[in-house]
Image (cartoon, rainbow, N blue to C red):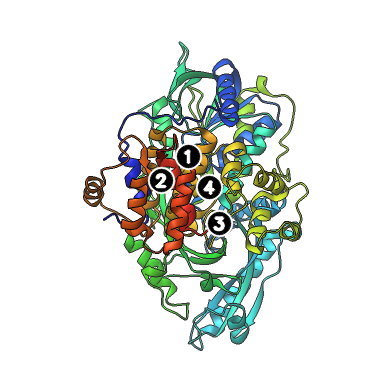
Amino acid sequence: MISCKRLYRYAAVLIGSGSIALDNGQGTPPCISKRDATIARTASTQYDILIVGGGATGCGVALDAVNRGLSTCLIEADDFGSGTSSRSSKLIHGGVRYLEKAVTNADLSQLSLVSDALRERRHMMSIAPHLTTCLPIIVPIYDAYPYVLFTAPYYYFGMKVYDLVCGFKGALKSSYFMGKQETIDQFPAIQQDNLKCSIVYYDGLQEDARMNLSLALTAEEDGADVVNHVRMEGFIKNDQGAIIGVKLHDTISNIKWDCFAKVVVNASGPFSDSIRHLDDSSLPNIICPSIGVHITLPQDCSAGGAGLLIPKTVDGRVLFLLPWEGSTIAGTTDAPTTVTVLPEAKQQEIQWILDQLATVLSRPLTLSDVKSSWAGIRPLASPPSNANGGTKSISRDHMIDVNGISGLFTIAGGKWTTYRSMSEDIINRVLLLHPKLSKGKPCSTYGRKLIGAETWFQELHEAIETAGFAPDIAQHLSHAYGDRYTRVLNLCAESDLNLNHRIIDCLPYIRAEVVYGVREEHALTAVDILARRTRMAFINSALARDALPLIISLMSHELHWSQDRMIDEFQAADVFLNTMGSAHRVSDSSLSASIQNLKIAQNGFLTLSEAQSLVYSCSLFSSLTPSECSHLIHQFHRALRDGTHISLAAFCYISSIILNNTIA
C-alpha cells in the first residue's frame, strides 16, 4: 500500500530514465523564447558591467548600474533571492541591538550603521509600499522590583534614542510606554505572570522574496539583462591577467557559452569567497558565514498584529516574534557555519527558539506547532583577528574588495535593509577606477519606485473583492503584486484550468499566480513557485508538499515539460521541502519498497482500469466518498488519450484537484 499523499511522486519515479516528451504540439513557450533571446544577447554583447549573484545586493547593483547608463547583465546560479535574501527575519530595521552597542561602547561606527540603515528603511518602505508595512514591536519587561525601576526607563530611553536617530524624515511612529493590561490587550498571547509593563517601538516588515524579485524585474524593465538558473563557472582573462568575461552554464538547457564584460562584480553573498577563489585560489577568505534559523508558528501566536522582542535571551541574543503572511515567524539564531546551497534548521536550534518563547508566551509551544523552519546564511565580512564573542559580535557593515590584478570587484557583508546604499557604493567605486564607463549620471535609486508600486493604494484589495475573490485572496494579490494584480486576474479567464481557484485550501494563493510566475517572473522550477513567487514552503511546508502536484501540472502545461523533467521537479522539490521542516518525510528504503509494489505507469501512462484500481485500493483516496470516487474516475475518462490511456501528468493533476476540493 502506498503512503498517503505520496502517490504522485512514486508514480513519477516509475517512468524511468527515458525521455518522454509531452505531446502538446505547441512549440517553444513564449517565456522560454524571451529567455533564449536574453541569453543570446549575453553571448553576443560586451557589457559595461556584469553582476554575479541575484540576491538583494546583486539586483540592487544591477538597478543602480543600468540607471546610470551602463550596459548591464546580471546572472544568478539558482533563482533570484534563492539564498539568504529570501530567508531573512523579514524586518526592515536599523537594529536596536546595534544601537545599544553604539551607546554602551561609544562606538561611532555602529551608530553610523544604524543611522544609515534607518535612512534606507524609509527608502524601502516608500519604493514598495505594497510589500512593506509599519509594525509595532513590543518589548515586554518582567524584571522584579526594584530592578524594573531601572530596566523600564533604560529600554524607554533606548527606544527614544532610536526614534531620534531616525530623524524627522525617517521616523515611522514614536515609541511609547504601555502598562501591563494595555500590553495584554495588544498582545493577547503574552505571558502575563510577572509582566510589569512594556515599551513599544516601530520598524518595517517586508515580503523579502518578492522585494528581491521586484528589484530584478525593475532592473530588467530599465534595460538590464537579468537571467536566473545560469551558473558562472570560470573567468576569461587577457594576457595581463585582467578579467574580460565569464564562462556561463545554463542549468535549464545545459548550454554553455562565454559572456564578455569590462567589469565583473561579485555579489554572491555567502558564496563570495568561492567566486573569488575561481579568480585566485590563493586569496584569503573575507566572508565569515553565520547561520540564522527561523520557524513559522500559527497566527494566534501574534494575534494582536504586533511583533514581540525578547531583548536578551539566555545567551545574550535578541529574539523576534513577528506576524507575517497570516502566520507568525520567530527567530533568529546566530552561530558560525559552513556555506551550503540548502542550509537546514537543526532540531536543537528549533527547540532553542521554542524554549526562549516559553518565557514570554502564555501557552507552551511544541515541535508540532512548527509549520515550517528554515535557515539562512549571513555573509558577514570577516572580523579582525582579535574579534571575540562569536558571529553575533561581528559588525553588519559592508566592505568592498578589489583584486588589483584581475580587476574583480566583490561586495560583502551588510544587511538587507542597506542593499541600496551598498549598491551605490560599489558602482561609485567601479566608476572611480573605470572613469571611461561613466555616462555622467548620478545615482538615482533612492526613492525610485519598484514595479507594482506606482499606482498602488492601501484599499486596493476592496476592488479585488468586488471581482468575486475572498478577502484573504484579495489582500494577498494586492500586497504581492501591487498595481499589477490585474495582470494576474486577466489570466483567470484565459483557459479551462480554473485559474481563479486556490492552489490549496487554507492559503490565499490562486492558480493564476503559477502561470503568471512562469510567464512574467522568470519562474522555471517548482521550487521557484513554492518558495519565492508564493511563500508556501515558508508558511507551511506540509501544505506546500500537498500543493506540489498541481503546481507541477500547471507549470508543465506552460513550459511543455517532458516526463523526465517532471520527475526531476518532483525530486528537487522533495529535497528542498525536506530542508524546510516538512512533516511528510519518507526514507529511501520506504520509497523503494513502494515502487516495487506499484508495477504500473512504466511508460508514463496508466490504463483506465489501473487508475480505477488505484482509486479504490490506495490510501491516498481513502477520504473520498463513493460518489467522489466516481466523479474522479469520470474525470480520468475525460482525459483519456486514444480512448485507452491517461497520462501520468493528467492523473496527478486531476487527483490533486479532487483531493483538495477545488473542482468546480
Query: Viewer-proximal residue, 192 or 210?
Result: 210
Q: Establish if 259 lies above or below 388.
A: above
Disc number for residue 90: 3
Badge 4 crowding class, 10 Å Cα cut-off, few under 14, some 14 to 19, many 20 or more, is many
Q: Quadrant of residue 72?
A: top right
**Mark 1 falls on what kind of element?**
loop
Residue at x 70%, y 50% (from the top left corner): 482
- Residue 491 in the image, given as x and y percentages of width and height: 66, 44
Amino acid type for the residue under numbered disc 3: Lys
> Are the residues flagged by discs 2 and 1 in contact, CB closer than 8 Å?
yes
Query: In this figure, which residue is indicated by the disc labeled 2?
Result: 573
- C-alpha distance separating marks 1 and 4: 11 Å
Quadrant for residue 391, please give it. bottom left
Three-letter residue code for mark 4: Arg
Looking at the rendered image, the disc whose residue lies closer to the viewer, 1 or 4, is: 1
Residue lying at the far top in this picture: please name it: 239
Label 3: few (<14), some or many (≥20) within 10 Å? many
Residue 532 is tagged as: 4
Q: Circle 1 sits on which residue?
A: 525
- Mark 1 or 4 closer to N-term? 1
In the image, 162 versus 32, the foreground residue is 32
Q: Is residue 296 left or right of residue 128?
A: left
- SS state under label 4: helix
Marks 3/1 in contact by CB < 8 Å: the verdict is no
Circle 1 packing at 10 Å, graded few (<14), some (14-19), many (20+), is: many
Relative to residue 630, is residue 32 drawn left or right?
right
